[in-house]
Structure formats: C-alpha cells, structure tokens
Image (tube, coloured by chain):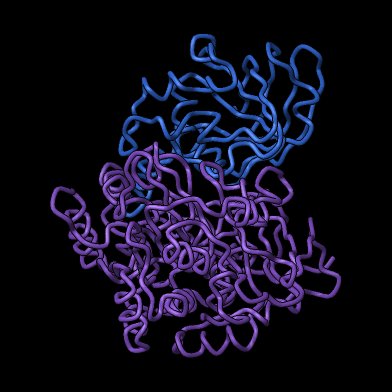
C-alpha cells in the first residue's frame, strides 16, 4: 500500500522506514515552538527536574505572542525577560514582544520547511502546513522535547479533503473553514487524523488563504493538516530557508486515505459562527441586523496581508459606525511593516480602527476586553463564554469581509451587500 | 504491571471537555488549578450528583469524539476525583497527551461502549492493549501505549517522568569512571 505525502514525514522524524496510523512512536521533531503565558509553568517543571542544559537549544523557538506589550498591572513582562534570559543562556531562538504570532515567526523565519516535523504548543500552528511542515500540538511537553530532543506522538490517520472550484466575490476561505467545523466537529470522522488538502481548488488560494484554512482546521476534529507544496509555496520556502535543508514528500500511487470529502469553493457562502459553540455556523443572513459593539480582525486565522487588504478595501474612504470599536492586529512585525508600505494602516486608522501590536491580542481577550452584554464580531478562533472578557458577552466569528462590513454598518450584514461590484469594494 | 481495574461510569458521544467534563467558563481562576472547584463541577452537566458518587479507582467509558478541544483542567478534574482511566470510542491525540501529562491514561478503543455499562468492572491493560469486562469476560482491543508513555503513566505524569529522565541522564554522565 502506498503512503500519502503526510505519512512520510513521521518515519523520517522517527528514524524508521514506516509507521502505522494510530501507532504511538518516539520522534525527534525538527523544531519545538513555545509561547509566553505558560512559560513560568514550563520553567518550573524544568527547574524541579534539575534541568541544566537542553539537548538541542538550536531547535527551540520561543516567541512572545500572547502578551504583546508589557502592560501596567500585569505580571507578564516578567515572562518576557525570563524567556529572553533563558534563550540567551541556553542558545535557544527568542522572538520578543511585537515579533508576531508563532505561526508567522515559524514560516517567515524559515523554520517551517517542507517535510519537517514541528512540535508546538498550539494546534492552530497547523498553518505552517502551507509550506509542507507538519505541526503537532503539545503543551507542557514543550519542556520534555526541548530537554530530551525526543517525545512520543500518535501517528495521525491520513484524510483527504479535495477542493474544487473558486471562491466567489465576498466569500472567503474563512467561510469554508467554518463550514468544515460545522460539518465535522460533532463527529469523529477526522479524529486523530492529518488532513491533506488537495484538488484544483488549492491553486486558486493564495498562501495566506491556505494558512487561514489550515489554522482553523483543528476545530473540525483532526490533529493537524497539510497543503500540497506547489510552486507558490516553494517560491516562499526558497526565499526563507536559506541553505537549511528540507524534503518534498508526495503521495505514492494508490495511497489510501481513512476518510475523504470534497468541497466546491464556488458553492461557499458567507457564514457566521454563533457563540458559545464553534460548530454553530449559519449563513450570515440568519442573524443580519444584530447590533455589534466591537469588531476585530486578528488571530492566526486572519491577520495576514490578504486579510488587511480586504479590510482596507472595504474601509477605504469610509468611517466605521460611531458606536463600534474596531481593533486590527497584523499577524507579525513583517506584516505590520508591509501593511505600512502599502498604505493599508493609514486607510484602516482613518476609518476609525485601532491598530494593535502584532500577536494574539484580542483573540484571547488580552486586549479589546468585552463587558457584560457586549457583542463582538471578529476573525478570532474561539467563541466560548468568557473568551474575550465577560462571560455575559457574545462573540461571533466570521471572515475579514464580514467583520469589516459589520464595523461599517454597526450591525451584522451580508458583506456582499457592501461590495459595490463583484469582488471589489464600492 | 500495566493493568488498571476499576468501576465503570459510562457517558455518550461528543462529550465536550470544556462544557461537559467540566465547565471551563466557570473555572474560577484559569491561571491555577482550583482542585475543589474542578472536582465539584466534574460531569455535573451530565450527572448532577457525579462528584458525590465517583470513587478512587473509577474508570470513565465514553463514546465517540470524547473531549475534542480541551483544556488540561478537564484531565486534572478527573484525576483529582479518583478516575484512573478513560476508555473511549474515539478522541483526539491532544487529549491523550494532556491526560497522560497528569498521569491519566485516555485510551481510544473501538467497541468499548458495546461491552461496558455503568457499574461494571473493567480491566484495561495499557501494555497489551486489551480492555476486558470482568463481569462478562467480553474484550475489545486497542493500540497499546509505547514504553515511553508507560513510563510517564507509571511515574504519575510528565513532571515526575522528566525528573526521572534527567536524573538518569545526569547519573549516566557522572557515572563510573
């Protein structure tokens, strides 16, 4: 039986010829990536275990992304310094406040490369699958992997989701991501799997769009996900990898998948996720007219150049509704700078939006905290009660189009009604 | 010894970790593990008296898609309440990992809900991959844990296991000349 492309990554990391789906194996990941808020707990475990050195500090990537700026009244600035000092002492890689999301640092700095296995403390870092790197979510085991240069993992089952067609104006890949969560989150069709996206629809998606889909995929049920590495992805990799190695894996003829599904991108409609469950996803028209207090474009799902361009295309020359607060967070320092060069930041600021420092920011309620009864629409990843502040607040999720359109209208609207002509802002 | 024997509590499909096993939005302080609060909310959405009924050594048997998208608080609530294993039709790998980090084995085992009911006693052997109903003798097989996972389980979780590994490595490096 042939192997899928994704299945070939793990044998390499395990030092074996082959592995079986569902098998527990010991692997040496190529990189381990961790963040800041959980750092004190990680450090404590290492200290209590008597750790004095890391097996491969060069493989550890430490990123401050959850607490982007050290604010008064928080203890987080202590974490920033502790991480910086730890990295300097051990020779690990450190990216301080404002560097951006781990997802972005990994790909922009060329750590994420085709065929590599990355252990990180977040499943949404599956976004690095856009360049063929396999993310595996761990948590406290960041320390084990860093100290011992090995850890166990479950070999995921290969699943294929084939994309056909092309998205229509006003519709975004985020809408499909929410549909996948609706369709699969309450099933085990994707449990313990790696989704390999495939089909002619993939080439219609930019690298940013692919990362959006991959970053949201975990909530539909799988362990992780990958995209095919085509020329678009390879161009990006070549520009970032330098002389660091990578390996392209493709599926053998006759490779078998544990589950398959097909989605036609041209049939996707603008969707909105209703709190507090991620799988409650409805056409935006179902709740059009709902007054909002806050709009936010942020998170590993949607904080890349495509997302900022789309927001700016709607907001250019307009003002958001008086009663709405809008926050926009570029996903990384590189994206922030690029958005500045393109003039997007001034468009967004002049429309009344607040630009925040790159990182997780509003997605987990570090900024843009919601009060009792407040309603937000955002591109965030989560919507449970209390995620963004008050447990009495309501957090709706949608695409950057949907969020920008809602910010302008002051209420939930179908973004297509704001578009003046197909595919372009009026 | 890789066997866990205990009294069964069964639950259905799609049991949410954060809104089923516990109620994450009602955890008083997310920065720490508030053990009394976590124990008091364990499975109460599904069985209001569960915290009073659960005993040391009990085993949870559940259906498909157990605890997807979890926070570790759900595992801490179970282990601190005395639950010693969860044997489920399906779950996600991250939950297996979070459970083991706190010394709680989560075992995906197809068919387990066909052979185990609340009140039964089952034996789950992590090393051989067999779950057996001690009342009926019915068995189901599952993928056994690998050695490094068994070591973490035996030592009670990730932190003690790391201590052991580091101590062993240090002893090796400082070993006999």
How far across and down, in percent of the image, does residue A317 sit?
38, 81
Nearest the camera: A175 or A366?
Answer: A175
**The N terminus of chain A lies in quadrant:** bottom right
Residue A133 is left or right of residue A31, and the answer is right
Q: Residue at x 61, y 58 (%)?
A: A271
In the image, is residue A420 above or below residue A153? Answer: below
In the image, is residue A336 above or below residue A294? Answer: below
Query: How many numbered marks does the figure carry?
Result: 0
Tell me if I can see residue A92 in this picture.
no
How far across and down, in percent of the image, does residue A201 sit?
72, 76
Residue A388 is left or right of residue A21, and the answer is left
Q: Residue at x 67, y 67 (%)?
A: A6
Residue A19, by quadrant, is bottom right
Q: Residue at x 68, y 82 (%)?
A: A203
Residue A301 is left or right of residue A2, and the answer is left
Q: Residue furthest left?
A: A72
In the image, is residue B78 above or below residue A263? Answer: above
The chain displayed purple equals A
Q: Residue at x 62, y 24 (%)?
A: B60
Nearest the camera: B172 or A302?
Answer: A302
How far across and down, in percent of the image, does residue A175 sit?
61, 63
The chain displayed blue equals B
Residue A103, by quadrant, is bottom left
Nearest the camera: B18 or A122?
Answer: B18
Tell me if I can see residue A192 in this picture.
yes
How far across and down, in percent of the image, does residue B152 sit?
48, 39
Residue B9 is left or right of residue A315, and the answer is right
């Amino acid at each position: 039986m042939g192997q899928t492309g994704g299945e070939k990554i793990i044998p390499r990391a395990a030092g074996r010829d082959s592995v079986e789906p569902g098998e527990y194996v010991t692997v040496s990941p190529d990189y381990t990536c961790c963040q800041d808020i959980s750092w004190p707990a990680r450090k404590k475990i290492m200290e209590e275990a008597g750790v004095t050195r890391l097996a491969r500090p060069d493989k550890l990537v430490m990123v401050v992304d959850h607490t982007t700026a050290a604010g008064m009244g928080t203890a987080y600035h202590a974490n920033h310094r502790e991480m910086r000092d730890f990295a300097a002492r051990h020779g690990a890689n450190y990216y301080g406040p404002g560097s951006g999301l781990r997802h972005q640092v990994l790909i922009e700095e060329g750590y994420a490369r085709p065929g590599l296995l990355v252990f990180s403390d977040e499943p949404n870092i599956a976004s690095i699958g856009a360049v063929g790197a396999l993310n595996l979510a761990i948590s406290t085991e960041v320390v084990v992997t860093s100290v011992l240069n090995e850890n166990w993992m479950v070999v995921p089952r290969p699943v294929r989701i084939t994309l056909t067609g092309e998205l229509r104006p006003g519709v975004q890949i985020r809408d499909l991501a929410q549909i996948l969560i609706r369709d699969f989150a309450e099933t085990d069709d994707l449990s313990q799997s790696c989704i390999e996206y495939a089909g002619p629809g993939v080439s219609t998606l930019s690298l940013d769009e692919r990362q959006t889909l991959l970053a949201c995929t975990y909530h539909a049920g799988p362990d992780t996900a990958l995209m095919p590495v085509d020329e678009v992805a390879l161009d990006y990799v070549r520009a970032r990898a330098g002389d660091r190695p990578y390996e392209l894996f493709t599926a053998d003829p006759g490779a078998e998948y544990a589950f398959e599904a097909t989605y036609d991108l041209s049939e996707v409609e603008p969707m909105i996720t209703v709190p507090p469950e991620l799988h409650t996803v409805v056409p935006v028209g179902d709740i059009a007219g709902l007054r909002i207090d806050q709009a936010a474009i942020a998170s590993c799902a949607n904080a890349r150049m495509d997302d900022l361009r789309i927001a700016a295309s709607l907001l250019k020359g307009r003002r958001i509704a008086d009663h709405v607060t809008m926050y926009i967070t570029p996903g990384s320092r590189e994206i922030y700078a690029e958005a500045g060069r393109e003039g997007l930041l001034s468009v967004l600021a002049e429309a009344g939006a607040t630009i925040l420092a790159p990182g997780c920011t509003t997605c987990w309620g570090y900024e843009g905290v919601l009060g009792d009864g407040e309603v937000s629409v955002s591109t965030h990843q989560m919507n449970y009660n209390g995620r963004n502040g008050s447990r009495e607040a309501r957090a709706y999720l949608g695409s950057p189009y949907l969020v920008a359109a809602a910010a302008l209208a002051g209420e939930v609207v179908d973004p297509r009604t704001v578009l003046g002509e197909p595919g372009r802002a009026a | 010894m890789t066997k866990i024997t205990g009294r069964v509590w069964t639950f259905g499909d799609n049991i949410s970790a954060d809104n089923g096993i516990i109620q994450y939005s009602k955890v008083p302080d997310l920065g720490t593990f508030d053990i009394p609060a976590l124990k008091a909310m364990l499975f109460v959405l599904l069985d209001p008296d569960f915290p009073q009924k659960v005993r040391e050594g009990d085993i949870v048997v559940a259906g498909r898609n157990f605890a997807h998208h979890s926070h570790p608080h759900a595992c801490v609530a179970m282990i601190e309440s005395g639950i010693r294993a969860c044997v489920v039709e399906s779950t996600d790998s991250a939950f297996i990992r979070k459970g083991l980090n706190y010394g709680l084995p989560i075992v995906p085992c197809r068919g387990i809900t066909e052979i185990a009911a609340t009140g039964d006693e089952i034996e789950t052997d992590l090393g051989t991959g067999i779950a057996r109903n001690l009342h009926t003798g019915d068995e189901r097989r599952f993928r056994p844990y690998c050695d490094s996972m068994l070591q973490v389980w035996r030592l009670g979780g990730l932190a003690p296991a790391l201590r052991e590994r580091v101590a062993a490595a240090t002893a090796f490096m400082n070993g006999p000349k």
